[in-house]
Image: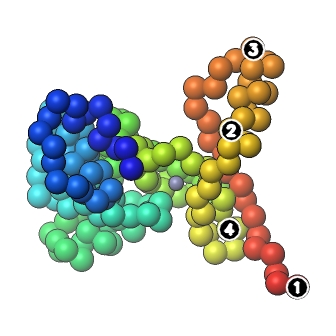
């Protein structure tokens, strides 16, 4: 995980952190830069999101956070997600089910395969696809700035 790369240069060497802790620290820095107060509830939401690997939607994030803090309002979750999205700290996905799902924006680039029967989201990377996309863009006279690739599939039955 190179999430903190560039931001810690010249800083004292911190103890190794887990990826989730790194993300939580980054989120906190993002919010501070945006001039936002780090409330207990925002910190809790960030922690939940940092620990998630399943592209949860706001309702799911709310459910997980609510288990720790029953005073949490769902509107606080939506507002926090909006703020983080505007700051580019999280990436919002709108897969075919029409629900906004979130993940940390600082992860290594990956694409998604969505199981249309279970809704499960599988992450993958392919050097071949990356190369091919760059080649196509170049042939059309472009450099790729970013891309999203979503595959929708049905699991093959074992034969
Ligand atoms: Zn993902």
Which label sits in the foreground, 4 or 3?
3
Instruction: Give the residue drawn at x 28%, y 59%.
Output: 18
Residue at left offset 70%, top offset 68%: 116
Quarter location, residue 46: bottom left
Quarter-wise, where is residue 45 in the image?
A: bottom left
Rounded to the nearest whole Å, what is the CA distance between mark 4 and mark 2? 22 Å
Residue 59 image point, x, y percent: 39, 65
Relative depth, front residue between 145 and 66: 145
Q: Which residue is mark 4?
A: 115
Residue at the farthest bottom position: 159
Q: Tell me the element at label 2.
A: helix
Query: CB of mark 1 within 8 Å of CB of mark 2?
Result: no
* Label 4 or label 2, whichever comes before in sequence order: 4
Q: CA distance from mark 4 to mark 3?
A: 34 Å
Q: Could one spot residue 24 in this view of the protein?
A: no
In the shown orientation, is residue 59 left or right of residue 23?
A: right
First along the sequence among labels 4 and 3: 4
User: Taking 78 as reference, is 140 left or right?
Assistant: right
Expressed as whole percent of the image width and height from the top left, the position of residue 100 reads: 49, 54
Query: Is residue 32 placed above or below 125 in the rendered structure?
Result: above
Seen in the picture, residue 109 relative to 146 is either above or below; the reply is below
Identify whether 6 is placed above or below 68: above
Q: Label 1: state its secondary structure.
A: loop
Drawn side of residue 55 relative to residue 79, left or right:
right
Q: Nearer the viewer, mark 4 or mark 2?
A: 2
The residue identified by callout 2 is: 130
Ligand 1 within 8 Å of disc 3? The answer is no
Per the rendering, the mark at residue 114 is none
* Residue 159: mark in rendering: 1
- Locate residue 28, reporting x and y percent: 20, 45
């Amino acid at each position: 995980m190179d999430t903190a790369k560039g931001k810690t240069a010249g800083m004292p060497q911190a103890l190794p952190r887990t990826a989730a802790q790194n993300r939580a620290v980054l989120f906190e820095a993002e919010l501070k830069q945006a001039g936002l107060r780090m409330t207990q509830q925002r910190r809790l939401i960030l922690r939940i999101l940092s620990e998630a690997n399943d592209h949860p939607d706001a309702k799911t994030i709310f459910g997980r956070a609510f288990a720790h803090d029953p005073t949490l309002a769902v509107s606080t979750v939506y507002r926090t997600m909006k703020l983080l999205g505007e700051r580019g700290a999280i990436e919002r996905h709108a897969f075919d089910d029409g629900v906004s799902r979130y993940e940390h924006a600082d992860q290594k680039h990956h694409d998604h395969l969505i199981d249309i029967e279970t809704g499960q989201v599988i992450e993958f990377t392919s050097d071949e696809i990356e190369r091919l996309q760059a080649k196509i863009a170049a042939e059309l006279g472009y450099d790729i700035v970013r891309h999203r690739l979503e595959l929708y599939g049905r699991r093959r039955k074992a034969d």
